[in-house]
Amino acid sequence: CQVDPAAWSDYMQQSLALALETGNHYEALSAQGNLAAMFANVGDILSAEQFFCEARATASKIGASRDSYYTSNYLAFTGFLRGDLDQMKQYLPLQEDIVIGKVGTTLIAATLATRALLAIVNGEIEISEQLARQSLEIPSNTRTELLAYWALAMVSMERDKLTDANHWLSAYYKQPNTTLYPGVVTRLLPVASLFLARCGQLNRSVQILSLATNHPASQIGWLRNWSIGANLRSELELRLGKVDFQEQWNQGMSLDLVETINLLASELSEEPQ
């Protein structure tokens, strides 16, 4: 069934208030973590980081080490989204701490996928691919799989393997209910834009990049750390010319996100030329 993010957030806020009022730290921790994840999914990164920090403090207070690792990994990820690699490195759990028996498989997979994203923006292509594929081999959840797909799409673009990039972009955007979460679907749009540009679809590429840049839920600070994507806007403007570029950019600003994602998923069903 589909979940209304706003209604679910209101419910969790009430649960958190009750837990804090009654001194139930475990229920508070659960609510804080769920709220943080939800705010990240809808693109409110500042609120997400606030609740992740609160959850991390609560986990430390009650000695919940697994939850402490979980929230630390998420704080590393939100740092990545904002382009703050120092924060990412500060909070990313040590690999030796993320092992079966000490934490659950989902956290192991999530940490591997998060490390894959860090590796690809550091130019470590082979390491990124290895980490992402290891993540997909471990039982986890859709949210974690999306991180691995994202990293593998970037790896494919680094190698200019458009068929592979098409595969991973398609896998990302065909996950059920992803359009419910604008913060999730906008994250990968710069990779899709670069893919379209390399397929010769320059107008469409500019529109998608404009949507990624201007949508209020979009968090693409990470793009400035990716060497082949950081200058994508200026490269497209150079190839199209300022007038044509601006026309397409303006069109992208007015695109409907859900309609665009559904159309993009359909376009990715076709093999790149």
Image (tube, grey):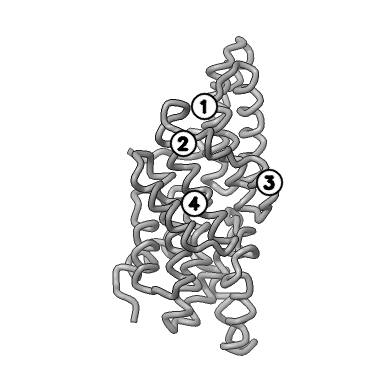
258 vs 20, nearest the viewer: 20
Q: How many angstroms separate mark 1 from mark 3 (CA)? A: 20 Å
Q: From what the image shows, is residue 176 above or below residue 165?
A: above
Tell me which label, 1 or 2, sits earlier in the chain: 1
Label 4: which residue? 184
Label 2: which residue? 107
Q: Residues within 10 Å of mark 1 (few under 14, many from 20)?
A: some
How many tags in the picture? 4
Tell me which label, 1 or 3, sits earlier in the chain: 1
Q: Which amino acid does label 4 sit on?
A: Val
Q: How many angstroms separate mark 4 from mark 1 (CA)? A: 24 Å
Q: Residues within 10 Å of mark 2 (few under 14, many from 20)?
A: many
Name the disc covering residue 36, or none.
none
Quarter of the figure with residue 26: top right
Q: Give SS at disc 4.
A: helix
Q: Which amino acid does label 2 sit on?
A: Leu
The picture places residue 263, in percent across and down from the top left corner, at 37, 67
Tell me which label, 4 or 1, sits earlier in the chain: 1
Tell me which label, 2 or 3, sits earlier in the chain: 3
Task: Report if the CB atoms under discs 1 and 3 are less than 8 Å apart.
Answer: no
Q: How many angstroms separate mark 4 from mark 3 (CA)? A: 20 Å
Q: How crowded is mark 4: few (under 14 residues within 10 Å), some or many (20 or more)?
A: many
Q: Which amino acid does label 1 sit on?
A: Arg
Label 3: which residue? 87
Tell me which label, 2 or 4, sits earlier in the chain: 2
Q: Which image quadrant: the C terminus?
A: bottom left
Give the residue furthest to the left: 270
